[in-house]
Image (spheres, helix red, strand yellow):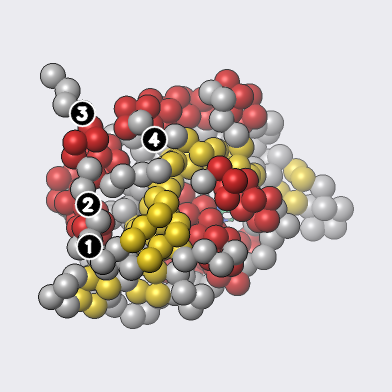
Amino acid sequence: RQSNPADFLEKPHEMSNIKKVIGVVSGKGGVGKSLVTSLMSVLMNRRGHRTAILDADITGPSIPTIFGLREKATGSDLGLYPVRSQMGISVMSLNLLLENESDPVVWRGPVIAGTVKQFWTDVIWSDVDYMFVDMPPGTGDVPLTVFQSIPLDGIIVVTSPQELVSMIVSKAVNMARLMNVPILGIVENMSYVECPDCKKQIKVFGESHIEQTAAEYGLSVLGKIPMDPALAKVCDAGAVELFEGDWLDSAADKLEELA
Ligand code: ADP
Ligand code: MG
């Protein structure tokens, strides 16, 4: 028999006051989940919202790298303190706690889920308008357990044109329905390449079915992100906060409206 999944939801630290929590999910790794989490956070932060990132992708934590965080997180009797990015985004990630970041984390599901839970219950987030959660990839046991411990207000699904988008979206829709959390929209990453000379959008992976799939499920497409070497470069250099792109503003408008 299934109990109500909402019964497992944990309370945040008593010194945290978090208004909106948005989970970022994907069908598999490598489609740009962390990149979308980072960009959305940067956009909201630029718009003057107090923004935070909870890096729940314990076995592949990449948020500290994308933001170029060098400090480690500190703690006191009261709890753990997130690390602030240059522009003031609060981040908590396993990489900010590990002495040696290159040590691979080979933990089983329950330990991973327990760690994420602690990022929610034991971190002193203070006042946050938007918290983005970089979820573990997929819709398996681990993401589901994480799902059950953090009260998400909405979900963003990241897809790429190489994937079987309809299946990923339908899985995400099922997971969201189970938890009674709305899907805010779909972001298609690596959607096209822009010709540097003529500015034409070239669809290297062929026509995408994202609009069709979104319409089928009554969802909106939050944005389409081009395959952009400059974007990969700023992420590798830990300078995502400096990135500018034409398509950024409309994605932020839509997200703000939906959230
Ligand atoms: P995930 O979190 O889903 O595993 P990442 O966000 O880490 O994926 O992205 C995987 C890799 O692809 C990273 O090195 C990232 O910089 C690169 N990447 C993702 N999206 C783009 C894009 N639109 N343009 C260029 N590089 C990208
Ligand atoms: Mg990632």
Asked if the beta carbon under badge 2 is closer than 8 A to the nearest atom of ligand 2, the reply is no
The quadrant in which the N terminus is found is top left
State the image quarter where residue 248 is shown.
Answer: bottom right
Measure the C-alpha gap from mark 3 to mark 2. Answer: 16 Å
Secondary structure beneath dot 3 equals loop
* Disc 2 residue type (three-letter): Lys
Residue for badge 3 = 4
Q: Is residue 52 left or right of residue 250?
A: left
Label 4 is placed on what type of residue? Answer: Val
Mark 1 / mark 3, whichever is N-terminal:
3
Residue 27 appears left or right of 195: left
Residue 72 as seen in the image, left or right of residue 190 = left
Picture coordinates of residue 247, whole percent (x, y): 70, 53
Q: Which mark is residue 181?
A: 4
Decide: few, some or many residues near mark 2? Use Cα within 10 Å; few <14, some 14-19, many ≥20: some
Labelled disc at residue 14: 1
Image location (x, y in percent) of residue 156 = 48, 42
For label 1, the crowd category at 10 Å Cα-Cα, with few meaning under 14, some 14 to 19 and many 20 or more, is few
Residue wearing tag 2: 11
